[in-house]
Image (tube, rainbow, N blue to C red):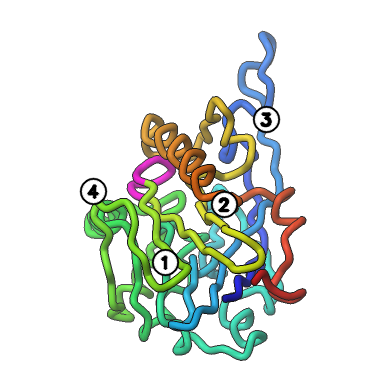
Amino acid sequence: MKLYVLDGGRLYLDESLLVAGIHNATLQNQNPSAQWVATPVISFLVETAAGYVLYDTGNHPHTNTNASAVYFTWQPEQLMPESLTRLGLAPEDIKYVVQSHLHSDHVGYLHLFKNAEVFVSDEEFTQAMRLYGLGRFGGAIKRADFESFLGAQLNWRLIPSDVCEVEICEGVTVVNLGPGHSFGMLGMLARLPHSGNFLMCSDAINREENLGPPPRLPTLLYDSLGYIKSVEFIRRYARERDARILYGHDMRQFAGLKKSTEGFYD
């Protein structure tokens, strides 16, 4: 087995979206100005004997609009099609896609994976499709993403809220993290023979500061109580499986990871 870390570019956003209270307010300034920071867009690719498993599909340039609260920057080689090409792969070679959730910086190239079985939280899919049907777009939900992947007629596999784990193949398990950052989050556990276990949790935990204890909330979230429950579950789950947690937008952690352009974990 091999685990590749795919660098999908950078998002620029207000840091408090990731960790609430990161900017200290004072009595004279209860509403400090935004502090814009660069944060990584990350996908993970696992090569197994049963085929390739992709966790999240990156950000698409069409998400940049004047109304956006974040801004995406990239080099052409960082976009998902080029990342796969550099590894000698095409979207058709991916057997499974685990979509952590349906926000724009994670779902941008999902439409390419027509041959894959696509795992997503049932609650995430249902609630996001409701917003799509009502025409309520904004923030991290982008019309262009939904029109792309719905038009692709993908092979969906929805994970119900009462299912904790689904083993995709030997060494790779989908983990249901529940609501919090979004309506329903999926993580993925990869058990590597030499490098050990890795738990990918996407935006269920943006950065190490969110982990606590106690958990620190972001300002961009759907369910605050669900977020806390999810963080505590991830902490316990990772400890029991001796797994390293890979956060969704932690630039410090990302800088220390071996990227797919440099090699892989095995």
Question: What residue type is disc 2 on?
Answer: Ala
> Per the image, is 171 magenta?
no
Q: Residues within 10 Å of mark 4 (few under 14, many from 20)?
A: few
Q: Which residue is mark 2?
A: 243
Q: What whole-number distance in Å separates the C-alpha atoms at marks 4 and 2?
A: 23 Å
Mark 1 residue element: strand
Report the Cα–Cα distance between label 2 and label 1: 18 Å
Q: Nearer the viewer, residue 244 or 143?
A: 244
Is residue 180 shown in magenta?
Answer: yes
- According to the picture, the residue beneath numbered tag 3 turns out to be 33
Point out the stretch of residues depicted in magenta.
178-184
Placement of 250 over or under 264, stated as above or below = above
Q: Quadrant of the N terminus?
A: bottom right
Q: Residue at x 53, y 69 (%)?
A: 60
222 vs 235, left or right, is left
Q: Nearer the viewer, residue 204 or 19?
A: 204
Q: Earlier in the sequence, mark 3 or mark 1?
A: 3
Q: Which residue is denoted by mark 1 in the rendering? A: 98
Q: What crowding class fits label 3: few (fewer than 14 Cα within 10 Å), some (14-19), or many (20 or more)?
A: few
Contact, CB < 8 Å: mark 1 with mark 4?
A: no
The disc, 2 or 3, on the residue closer to the chain's N-terminal end is 3
In front: label 1 or label 4: 4
Query: Alpha-carbon neighbours of circle 2 within 10 Å: few (<14), some, or many (≥20)?
Result: some
What percent of the width, then of the height, locates residue 176?
36, 52
Distance of mark 1 from mark 4, alpha carbons?
A: 18 Å
Position of residue 18 measured from the top left corner of the image (x, y, whole percent): 58, 40
- Residue 2's quadrant in the figure? bottom right
Residue under label 4: 162
Q: Earlier in the sequence, mark 2 or mark 1?
A: 1
